[in-house]
Amino acid sequence: MSKGTILERVQEMTRQAQEREAEKLMTLELVKEAISEAARQGYSRAVIVPAKALDLTKTEMAKATVAQLRKEGFRTEWEVRLQADNTSYQALVVSW
């Protein structure tokens, strides 16, 4: 098996794992629930944070959810956050 084949395989495994994580957190329904909960508490923004330090910004689920939220008038941005061990991840910030 060539190195390119192994590289391609692990890249695809990574992509699939990121998609699975995004499906647990970034569906439009789940994000709207988080928005509603934040609004009930008086906040004007909701922050969606992945359970693992993963970059979900390029997943199809996150892209579709962000596009729909923007279409509905919400402002969205990806905010880089740093953990104590210097591992970074991106949180989705939705504001209204």
Image (cartoon, rainbow, N blue to C red):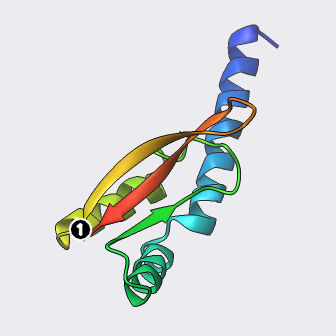
Query: Horizontal and vertical percent for residue 2?
Result: 77, 9
Q: Residue at x 44, y 79 (%)?
A: 38
Residue occupying the far bottom of the picture: 40
Relative placement, left or right, of 85 versus 79 is right
Q: Does residue 1 lie above or below 46 as drawn?
A: above
Query: Horizontal and vertical percent for residue 14?
Result: 68, 38
- Which of 61/44 is in front? 44
Mark 1 burial class by Cα count in 10 Å: few <14, some 14-19, many 20+: some
Image quadrant where residue 86 sits: top right
Image quadrant where residue 68 sits: bottom left
Residue occupying the far top of the picture: 2
Amino acid at pointer 1: Phe
Relative placement, left or right, of 67 versus 52 is left
Q: Does residue 76 lie above or below 44 as drawn?
A: above
Q: Residue at x 33, y 59 (%)?
A: 66
Residue occupying the far right of the picture: 1
How many labels were placed on the picture? 1
Question: In the rendered image, which quarter contains the C terminus?
Answer: bottom left
Query: Horizontal and vertical percent for residue 32?
Result: 41, 79
Question: In the rendered image, which quarter contains the N terminus?
Answer: top right
Q: Does residue 67 lie above or below 44 as drawn?
A: above
Q: Classify mark 1: helix, strand or loop.
A: loop
Q: Does residue 37 lie above or below 25 as drawn?
A: below
Query: Horizontal and vertical percent for residue 81?
Result: 54, 41
The residue wearing badge 1 is: 74
Q: Residue at x 69, y 48 (%)?
A: 17
- Which of 24/14 is in front? 24
